[in-house]
Amino acid sequence: MSQDDKKNMGIDLEDFLEFFLLDSQEQVERLGSGLLQLERDGENIALVNELFRSAHSLKGASGTMGFTPIVELTHAAEDLLDKLRQGKMLVTNEIIDVLLAVTDKVKMMLAQVEQRVEITEEYSELKDQMHVLAETGALSQTRTPVSKAAEVRRQTPTQADFTLTAAERGIVDEALISGKAILQVEVLFAPNTLMKAVRAVMVIQRLEPLGRVVKILPSIEELEADTAERFHLLFITVEPPEEIRADVLEVSEIMEVWIRHYSLSDSFKNHKDFSADSDFNSDFKANEQNENSTPGGEDKEDGSHPLQQAAAQTAADAKDNAANQVHTIRVDTVRMDNLINLVGEMVITRTRLVKIGNDLKAQNRSDALIDGLNETNVYLGRLMSDLQESVMRLRMVPVGTVFSRYPRLVRDFCRKTGKKIELVIKGEETELDKTVIEMIGDPLTHIIRNSVDHGIEAPEERIAAGKPEVGTITLDAYHEGNHIAITVSDDGAGLDIEKIYKKALEKGLIGDREEMSEKDITNLIFLPGFSTADKVTDMSGRGVGMDVVKKALNNLGGLIDIKTRRGEGTSFIIRLPLTLAIIQALLVEVGQEIYAVPLSSVIETLLVKTNEIKTVGGLPMVQLRGNTLPLISLKEKFDLHDENKIQNEVFVVVVGLGDKVIGLIVDELQGQQEIVIKTLGDYLNGLPGIAGATILGDGKVTLILDIGSLIQDILIK
Amino acid sequence: MAEEQLVTFLLGTEEFGVDIMKVQEIIRIPPITRVPKAPDFVEGVINLRGNIIPVVNLRVRFGMTLDEETDLSRIVVLQVNGKVFGVRVDGVTEVLRLDGESIEPPPPVALGMDSSFIRGVGKIGERLLILLNLDQLMGGDAVNEQTA
């Protein structure tokens, strides 16, 4: 279809492009994961059918939008899948490889479409590969003549049996009186057309501007069953038949169109008693049921209307069923962020109201109006937190969207190296803030690569060690208090503590007399410039170390932890905050500055006598219920001015992430408040110990402490 | 470049000029929140109608002695390469047009301050105007060293 044609259709392509992209990307994802499954299952006709349908609808959609390269690629893929489907070929690794390559290529092409640039991806080689596979892999060459004959037989017009209802009859009569032509349009689908109902609706939509569609045979519901190869339409128009035919042929997968004049005798013949009252009623009912449609009789006046509605609805249902879609609205993230910002500002404004209310109360204790104000404030607060939660939920995305890319990663690696690894994915439905989701992809990829490359041993090694030949990597996500934990565990060799220690010594990352626990040593891999890989492989060891992973996660307010046992495997545990935008915080005062501590990390607050604080190895510590709690003096950490006032007692805020707990020494506790997290901007991002900033009720900026980085700082040191 | 329109301001006895197109607004000094571990020339952050922006103390940045805040002190909010930040100055003097011909390249030894901050020197009769190179103010090496 040329550009002009598209304009003629009166459709703004840009409007559809977004839908096309979303839908196609989904289909590609489905193809990709389906292929991986097919590789595992071997023969699975149902799955091949599904893949075929995905490829097919991709092709159809791309064709409609005029993206020829995608059409050609998916067409070849479809051919290949068709052979598999018909049992003419067997599923082989080569086929899976080439089809996966197609999904990759199409993905890249879609990316180009998304960027509104021309598709320049080279694909002819892939196409040829598929053709060769389709030729050589085919078990039987006899198919072609048989199907040709079949097609010839089918390509002749047939007579439709139009039985008109009284309402339809009325429309036809009216048309005859006004001198309009009544045409019988017969439409033949291309072989193997899927979703015929949708095609039929497209045909109807095409015809709508030219006249009125009175009846369709077989009904849309029957077309749904996908057995029909053709359908008939009764169409009232003043346009010349040739034009109508050309128009209908524009719809993709429509093979042939015949148009004849519909003679009144046809309907007389089939509907002798149309004027009888009883028959009128029964017909009316039948009609209503048949079209499964619109309540109320007024629509019946307009014969084409209910039909089209029913058709459109059935088509929509069909689409729903086919894709098993959730009802969603897609909203620009900018708009959503705006909404969240507004809610954030409202939260700030409310805290101001609360402050005013409290101040008034302090001045004037007995005023009933002030009590009323404060009560309203409390209620408003509840509403606000509900609103906030709802808005924040808008940003939540299931973590499965990130997880879905890893089966492919692991599979490709196995193909390349001959390792045997099964990737088990759990907890895909666990939801995380969209920003977090976007940011954890790369760190997770890195960790999984690590597990795949360094964690899981080669099959021979595994057998020698008495383990199952196939290694397992488990990717899991679950709630843990106010955090989401994501774990990557493998049943591989575990970290080599000695090797790490030696390596760290070699690289001068630690002194040789330093005494370290096993845990301390495993944490060394997070130091910049550390890599134990003996050889650089394609998968990992590209100079990007675990330190980058750690930094990326810290930036998200997350924490990473390792558990490893020699010979049994390694687990990486990542803990991430649920949301990034609005949090509860404890405000603390240190050296005349106020800082916000995310309440999700606060375990308790203590009043500690200064003489109970002991310094061990340069770090202040305090005994807390038999355990030693390391302390950080925020005053020293942040070089704050101190008027040297001697305090007998200090406040300690005990904070923790995961199983790591430290205490922050502060001057005063200022109370708890909801705060909206804002960034410090491009220039000051990534300062140690600071996660961001917020604006308090009085308009002053307050910094938010980054507990993750504070803890990691002190515990790794 | 034919003619430039500049916002001029004072730091001590020196007069400076910045391109008016880079100036978003000029505000009185609001409460400034100190940011620990930030480069020393970053005095802190302020709340500019809900946005948090950093403020550079130009006296520190240019190695001048610190002075008390006065009624005339202002923050000039600049937008450079899409990023917004403020600079604290002792006072804003005027908006003026300067002919391209009256702008000379920076002198090699520049008034005791890092010459990379200086784009040129403008002459208006007897007055000397130091034209600032705004890209260097925040984007210089100092910030990168701190955050690397």
Image: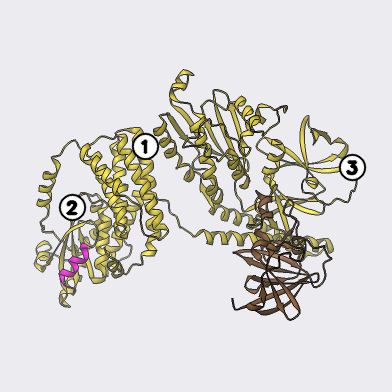
> Can residue A242 be found in the magenta stretch?
yes
Depth check, front residue: A15 or A104:
A104
- Dot 1 alpha-carbon crowd within 10 angstroms: few under 14, some 14 to 19, many 20 or more: some
The mark total stands at 3
Among the 4 quarters of the image, the one containing residue B117: bottom right
Circle 1 is placed at which residue position? A37
Residue B85 in the image, given as x and y percentages of width and height: 67, 63
Q: Amino acid at mark 3?
A: Asn
Give the letter of the chain under mark 2.
A
Left of A370 or right of it: where is A53?
Answer: left
Majority secondary structure of magenta residues: helix
Instruction: Please indicate, yes or no, whether residue A275 appears anywhere in the rendered image.
Output: no
Give the brown chain's letter.
B
Q: Residue at x 86, y 35 (%)?
A: A612
- Residue A648: mark: 3
Place of residue A709 in the rendered image (x, y in percent of width and height, measured from the top left) = 68, 43
Answer above or below: position of A191 versus A167.
above
User: Who's the residue at 79% across and 54% down the image?
Assistant: A593
Q: Amino acid at mark 1?
A: Gln
Residue segment shown in magenta: A239-249
Which mark lies nearer to you, 1 or 2?
Answer: 1
